[in-house]
Image: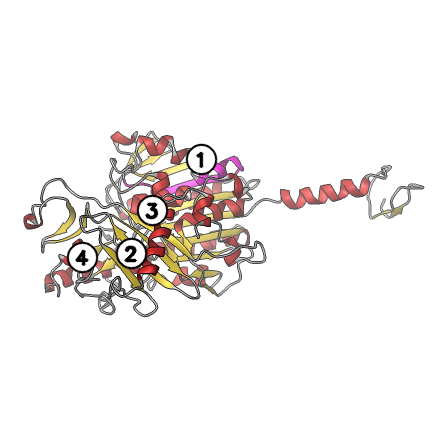
């Protein structure tokens, strides 16, 4: 039976009620409203997929080979053209992604155990408050596969038995990126791999295990996957089918390529410039091979989007694609690496699609890797005011129909240089304190490559101010509107009052914590 029933004075008329009639009370409208509100809130939250590449640049064409990714994520959503890492090195950057904090607040300074990369201090403190912990409490089914932190799984950092909190499924690489002949921690158990493409190639393994996780998930709860393939990190081992691709491609020759760092800090003044032909041949080969490795990541993106579509979950899933840091190939006569304060090392790709994100957006608002954690937790429904994070959600930037928010006008970039206590055998003349040296006596890092920068980016200013913790107290300042390749250090041309203001802002940012990092004036 269905129809309209009037229960007498004070009882509402309820159309379309089937089955046995129930006597309704005057409180029914309020109860119905509460039930409706609960139903809206109790709909399954959006799923989230985060893909973090390793050393993929944004400024030197790093996204060029990734046609699927640009079409299926960027064209279907938002491309952030001003995305930055707050520190241009793998382990501290990944620690910032996981915690939403600047390095001075999670205290992971470099890729070494002594620099707190996956150290006991990290595990007892920041890792226990990483964003997957909160997702897990919200009943998200969580899955990780690929490179985690550079020192993860080493005996000194707890071995493969250490599974960070918050993860339901854990398939993490021991140590730094490899494509073959590596060890995984699979839910705390050691799993060794060889060099057979079909079962060992790490990028494909990450994909295959993520697809299996999706097949076995519970449809009653949302899911979160963090996938971290090794590409395009060295040793740049492409899948067999891609090893002949891009044979005519060379590293870009524009901007600061093969230019001397004559007005820059000590480390940048050391390389021979112009570079010898051997260095150029080496970096061109690295550039090609990096692109080749990315083709498998691009295949991964296409396969995951198809899988989500087949599951009818694509329209309820946010997909983030980014990298831990940028990269350089010949800029300022440095052959290959990251670690520097310049745009090529601190800019990263960032593409996002998902509910409420309109397609074909190109967004100018500055976004940082410390913003990923609060954005993901914002999507999951967390009250962000309860979190101790330095970053801010950028959900309002890509989906203004869902959130209100403002973009930050400036931010901090900080890095702690690494060096060896004895001279490098390939470069004895420069003395101790250096690392990452090449045969031509070009070193990519040093103890005195320790710096902090204020990067300002809004409608009026596009500036960078950096101070070095070295014997020269060296300062570099760039106007990136006039000089986008940072060829001229204008510290001696800038009004001293402007320099003083930048210095004071930098001091505040270097000691900021949580909400204070978002309120520095």
Give SS at disc 2.
helix
Question: Of residues 463 and 230, which is closer to you in this image?
Answer: 463
| Mark nearer the viewer, 1 or 4 | 4
Q: How is the image coloured?
A: secondary structure
Q: Quadrant of residue 347?
A: bottom left
Q: Residue 366: x percent and y percent? A: 42, 58
Question: Of residues 394 and 388, which is closer to you in this image?
Answer: 388
Asked if residue 229 lies left or right of residue 333, the reply is: right
Q: Name the residue beneath numbered marker 1.
A: 166
Q: Residue 44: x percent and y percent? A: 59, 44
Magenta span covers which residues? 131-150
Asked if residue 280 lies left or right of residue 73, the reply is: left
Q: Name the residue beneath numbered marker 2.
A: 345
Residue 146: tell me if it is visible: no
The mark that comes first in sequence, 1 or 4, is 1
Q: CA distance from mark 2 to mark 1?
A: 30 Å
| Mark nearer the viewer, 1 or 3 | 3
Q: Determine which of the numbered discs, if any, sits on residue 414 in the image.
A: none
The mark that comes first in sequence, 2 or 1, is 1
Q: Name the residue beneath numbered marker 3.
A: 93
Q: Determine which of the numbered discs, if any, sits on residue 268 in the image.
A: 4
Q: CA distance from mark 4 to mark 3?
A: 22 Å
Q: CA distance from mark 3 to mark 2?
A: 12 Å
Q: Residue at x 43, y 36 (%)?
A: 129
């Amino acid at each position: 039976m269905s129809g309209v029933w009037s229960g007498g004075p004070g009882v509402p008329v309820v159309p379309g009620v089937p089955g046995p009639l129930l006597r309704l009370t005057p409180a029914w409208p309020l109860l119905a409203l509460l039930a409706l509100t609960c139903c809206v809130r109790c709909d399954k939250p959006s799923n989230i997929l985060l893909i973090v590449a390793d050393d993929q640049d944004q400024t030197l064409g790093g996204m060029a080979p990734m046609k699927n990714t640009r079409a299926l994520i960027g064209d279907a959503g938002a491309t952030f053209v001003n995305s930055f890492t707050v520190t241009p090195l793998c382990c501290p950057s990944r620690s910032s992604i996981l915690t939403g904090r600047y390095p001075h607040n999670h205290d992971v300074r470099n890729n070494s155990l002594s620099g707190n990369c996956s150290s006991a201090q990290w595990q007892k403190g920041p890792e226990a408050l990483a964003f997957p912990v909160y997702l897990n409490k919200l009943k998200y089914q969580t899955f990780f596969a690929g490179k985690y932190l550079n020192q993860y799984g080493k005996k000194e950092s707890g071995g493969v038995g250490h599974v960070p909190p918050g993860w339901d499924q854990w398939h993490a690489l021991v140590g730094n990126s490899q494509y073959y002949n590596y060890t995984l921690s699979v839910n705390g158990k050691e799993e060794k791999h060889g060099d057979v493409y079909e079962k060992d190639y790490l990028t494909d393994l990450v994909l295959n295990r993520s697809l299996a996780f999706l097949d076995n998930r519970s449809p009653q709860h949302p899911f979160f996957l963090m996938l971290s393939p090794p590409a395009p990190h060295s040793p740049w081992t492409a899948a067999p089918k891609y090893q002949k691709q891009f044979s005519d491609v060379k590293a870009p020759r524009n901007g600061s390529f093969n230019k001397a760092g004559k007005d820059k800090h000590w480390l940048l003044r050391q390389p021979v410039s112009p570079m010898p032909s051997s260095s150029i041949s080496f970096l061109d080969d690295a550039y090609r091979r990096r692109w080749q490795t990315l083709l498998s990541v691009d295949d991964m993106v296409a396969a995951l989007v198809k899988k989500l579509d087949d599951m009818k979950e694509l329209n309820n899933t946010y997909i983030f694609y980014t990298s831990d840091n940028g990269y350089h190939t010949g800029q300022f006569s440095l052959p290959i690496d990251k670690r520097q304060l310049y745009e090529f090392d601190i800019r990263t790709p960032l593409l996002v699609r998902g509910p409420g994100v309109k397609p074909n957006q190109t967004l100018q608002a500055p976004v940082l890797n410390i913003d990923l954690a609060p954005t993901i937790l914002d999507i999951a429904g967390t009250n962000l005011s309860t979190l101790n994070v330095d970053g801010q959600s950028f959900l309002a930037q890509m989906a203004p129909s869902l959130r209100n928010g403002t973009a930050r006008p400036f931010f901090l970039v900080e890095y702690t240089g690494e060096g060896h206590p004895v001279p490098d055998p390939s470069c004895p003349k420069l003395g101790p304190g250096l690392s990452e040296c090449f045969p031509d006596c070009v070193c990519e890092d040093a103890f005195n490559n320790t710096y902090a920068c204020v990067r300002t980016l809004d409608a009026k200013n596009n500036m960078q101010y950096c101070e070095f913790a070295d014997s020269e107290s060296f300062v570099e300042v760039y106007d990136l509107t006039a000089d986008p390749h940072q060829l001229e250090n204008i510290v001696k041309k800038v009004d001293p009052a402007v320099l003083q203001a930048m210095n004071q802002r930098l001091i505040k940012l270097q000691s900021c914590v949580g909400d204070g990092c978002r309120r520095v004036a």
